[in-house]
Image (tube, rainbow, N blue to C red):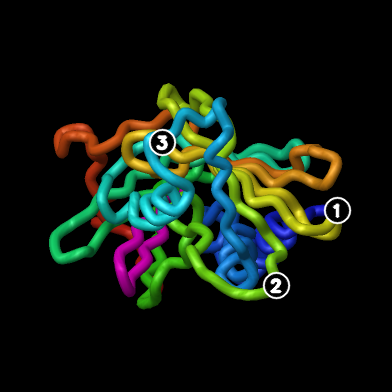
Amino acid sequence: VLGVFGRLLLFFSRIGPWALDRPLMGLCCLCVLLSSHAVWAASGADAHARSPWTLAQWLQQMQTASQRHSYVGELQVEIEGRRTRSLIQHVNQAQGSYEDRVEALGGRPRISYRQPGEVWTVWPQLHQALHEKRDAIPSFPLLLPKIAQGSGSVYVAQLGQRERVAGHWAQSIEFIPADHWRYVYTVWAEEGSALPLKMQTRDSLGHVLEEARFLTLQLDPSAASLRPREALDGYQVRA
C-alpha cells in the first residue's frame, strides 16, 4: 500500500514534468484533514519534551517559519524503501515574496525555480527550460497542518520527544488519529525557528511508511553562499 503520500506522489508524477521535484505531496491530505476535523491537546506533563513553547505556540510558529527564515539544505524523501534527494534553497525577499531553487539529485539533472505566480524548470544537460505562469504547489516543509477548531475529533496533536535532525535540535509533534483507519503523522520542528526538519507517516502498528527529512540544513545563510540562477543563454525555452 502506497499510503496517502505515495498515492499523491504517483498522481502528480503523471500529470507533468514539474511534479517530480515536489516531495511529499501527501502532506496536502494531512493539511485538509486537520484543517476541518482536528482537535488539539497539549501534553504538558511530558517530561521528555522540555519545550519552551506550548503546543498551540509550536503549531502557530511552524506555519510561519518559512516566511521568517531562509534556508539551504539537502532533503531526502523515502517511500517504501525508495529514496530521492534534492538540494533546496529557500530565500525570502522583500514584501513577502520568495524564491525557491530545487535541484534534483540523481537521474537527469533538473533544477526548478519558483516564485509567486511563476515556475521555471531547467534541464542543463539538454539546454531546455520550461516557463509556467502558475503558483508552485506547496511541498515539505512549506505546507503544514493548519490550526483549526472543529468537530469530528479525528486527530489529536501532542508534543513528543526532542531529537537531533540535520545537526539541529528538533521538537517532535505527533498527530494521532482517534481510530485505527488513519495514519499517524509526526513532524520534527527546529527548536529555534520552528521550521519543520522531518516528517513521518506511520501505520497503526508503528511501521514507518514514508519519511521526508533534511540531511543537512543551514538556516538564514549569507548571500555569498546562495546559488545564482542558471543562465539560459542558448537554451530552448518553452512556455
Does the magenta run of residues contain 146? Answer: no
Q: Earlier in the sequence, mark 1 or mark 2?
A: 1
Task: Identify the residue under disc 3.
Answer: 190
Disc 3, SS:
strand
Residue beneath the point at 27% across and 46% down: 69
Q: Nearer the viewer, residue 217 or 134?
A: 217
> How far is the residue under mark 1 from the one under mark 2?
26 Å
Three-letter amino acid code of the residue under disc 3:
Glu
Q: Is residue 225 above or below residue 33?
A: above
Q: Relative to residue 197, is residue 184 drawn left or right?
A: right
Disc 1, SS:
loop
Q: Relative to residue 1, is residue 28 drawn left or right?
A: left
Q: Relative to residue 153, is residue 70 drawn left or right?
A: left
Task: Identify the residue under disc 1.
Answer: 1
Q: Nearer the viewer, residue 167 or 89?
A: 167
Q: Which mark is residue 152?
A: 2
Residue beneath the point at 45% across and 35% down: 74
Residue beneath the point at 39% across and 50% down: 57
Quadrant where the image shows the C terminus: bottom left
Three-letter amino acid code of the residue under disc 2:
Gly
The residue range painted magenta reads 110-121
Does the magenta run of residues contain 111? Answer: yes
Three-letter amino acid code of the residue under disc 1:
Val
Q: Earlier in the sequence, mark 1 or mark 3?
A: 1
> How far is the residue under mark 1 from the one under mark 3?
31 Å
For mark 1, does the 10 Å Cα neighbourhood hold few (<14), some (14 to 19), or many (20 or more) residues? few
Q: From this viewpoint, is residue 94 visible?
A: yes
